[in-house]
Image: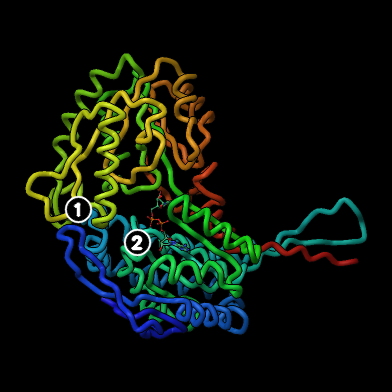
Amino acid sequence: MRDQIYIDGRYVASASGEMFDVIDPSNREVFHRVPAGNAEDIDRAVRAARRAFDAGPWPRMSGVERAAVLRKMGDEIAARISEIARIEVQDNGKPLPEAVWDIEDTAGVFHYYADLAERFDQEAEQKVELGMEGFSSKAVKEPVGVAGAIIPWNFPLLMAAWKVAPALAAGCTVVLKPSELTPVSALELGGIAERAGLPAGCLNIITGFGSDAGAPLTEHPLVDKLAFTGSVPTGSRIMAMAAKDIKTLSLELGGKSPLVIFADTPIEDAVEWILFGIFWNQGEVCSATSRVLIEERAFEALMERLVAEAQKIRIGHGLEDGVLLGPLVSPVQHEKVLNWIETGKKEARLVTGGGVPPGLEGGCYVEPTIFADVPEEATIWTEEIFGPVVCVKTFRTEEEAIRLANNTRFGLAAAVMSDDLDRANRVARAFRAGIVWINCSQPTFTEAPWGGYKQSGLGRELGEWGLNNYLEVKQVTTWD
Ligand code: NAD
């Protein structure tokens, strides 16, 4: 495991001279220490990225040449899935099979953007039809410049890939600031990039806290674009800081996503997707379907099965066989979620869970928790909990379900289940959310756009939309 930051193609110590502890949430013990990056480190990293962009070969290479580097990065990540997945388990707490998916996806994201970089050579220039003769015009896509990427802790390396891969594919250079809670896997990317042939300065990685490293990156005048994933309050602060220099900005923020279940849904399908929608990754998922709306006449039978299945979920260390729910990411997050549960007990009916599983008191574990009869104004219904806690409510009509689903300041994801596909599609269209699932919840595809309406964000990641995040469009018009 790396214990230095990565600037201008070299692993180096932080100018702060300080390190901070990285905690294993399964036992609350320190398992590693990484540099506490500061404004001076960020400045060195941004200047390296600026030089690499302004004078280096990377933005001037063809898409095919950039693709070769990205593909090699994906290949090395794919070859090291088991090793890197184990780092994620120790750092984040998630069960090993889920960490393996993350790293498989991470490799896939690099391979996907390698393909898009290759296509870019043909698609970078587009003829524009003018309504006047005597001139010809084209729209040319160019890399936006130096990108600052700030990411959260729930999918540590995958969230890095969602930003680093399209930014590099576009020809940008990058300064990456991973979450202070899960900084370990991201540091590996430096060596991986170097071995793949990425020129020095194109990728820089600074570990550290939001205030000491994230804020200086956000405010740095030589950064052209900021790509942020995290909470709404931090996103709002970053937007305000970016406003000073009119930096280009994309934001992937929080959610409180609904899952609407009509009575004609097969009960076992409903149970499966409710459980996956909220308990996958310990519920620490921005798109988690944490508000479940069940048609009233299906409520009792469905709840009975749901509670029985939730109680069977095996909780434990992420490396143990058969574990489906690991510890939450940190003692602070653990405390936060337990406090939400205490609030929930005053606001609604606790159906199952609600505590620390017996025998697992040494780690940051929380039982799968279900609240029912949750009033619409309850804070557990309106606020993002970011843990294995689901709120259930009933509805009588399609109109009521849509109104309840959309009555939120968030708009990241929404899901609907029904045997009647016309109805499901109608509801899907009515949702005010950037990602909509029909008869499932959570599947995520590198090719499809990802992002939120309302306070859940700005812009879209993944797919070709993710690449466009890192491109400017230049009009070039000639007098013929
Ligand atoms: P957070 O906002 O606390 O931190 C995210 C990142 O921002 C961290 O790297 C942190 O160090 C940095 N940061 C904190 N203060 C900063 C500042 N003043 N300036 C610059 N950077 C700063 O979020 P978190 O707790 O790490 O992640 C959980 C949140 O992320 C949830 O709200 C979740 O919904 C959201 N999320 C969204 C998506 C999505 O795709 N929409 C994906 C994953 C997580």
Residue at image position (22%, 60%) is: 89
Viewer-proximal residue among 351 and 7? 351
Q: Residue furthest left?
A: 359
Classify 20 as above or below 25: below
Q: Residues within 10 Å of mark 2 (few under 14, many from 20)?
A: many
Residue at image position (49%, 82%) is: 44
Q: CA distance from mark 1 to mark 2?
A: 18 Å
The reply to whether dot 1 and dot 2 touch (C-beta < 8 Å) is no
Instruction: From the image, tell me which residue sits under label 2.
Output: 156
- Report helix, strand or loop for mark 2: helix
Viewer-proximal residue among 146 and 340? 340
Quarter holding ligand 1: bottom left
Disc 1 vs disc 2: which is toward the camera? Answer: 1
135 sits left or right of 68 in the view = right
- Quarter placement of the C terminus: bottom right
Instruction: From the image, tell me which residue sits under label 1.
Output: 364
Classify 11 as above or below 454: below
Q: How far across and how far down the image is residue 198, in percent?
A: 46, 79
Q: How far across and how far down the image is residue 153, in percent?
A: 34, 59
User: Is residue 318 in sight in this rendering?
Assistant: yes
Q: Amino acid at mark 1?
A: Cys
Residue at image position (45%, 29%) is: 405
Q: How far across and how far down the image is residue 157, in percent?
A: 35, 63
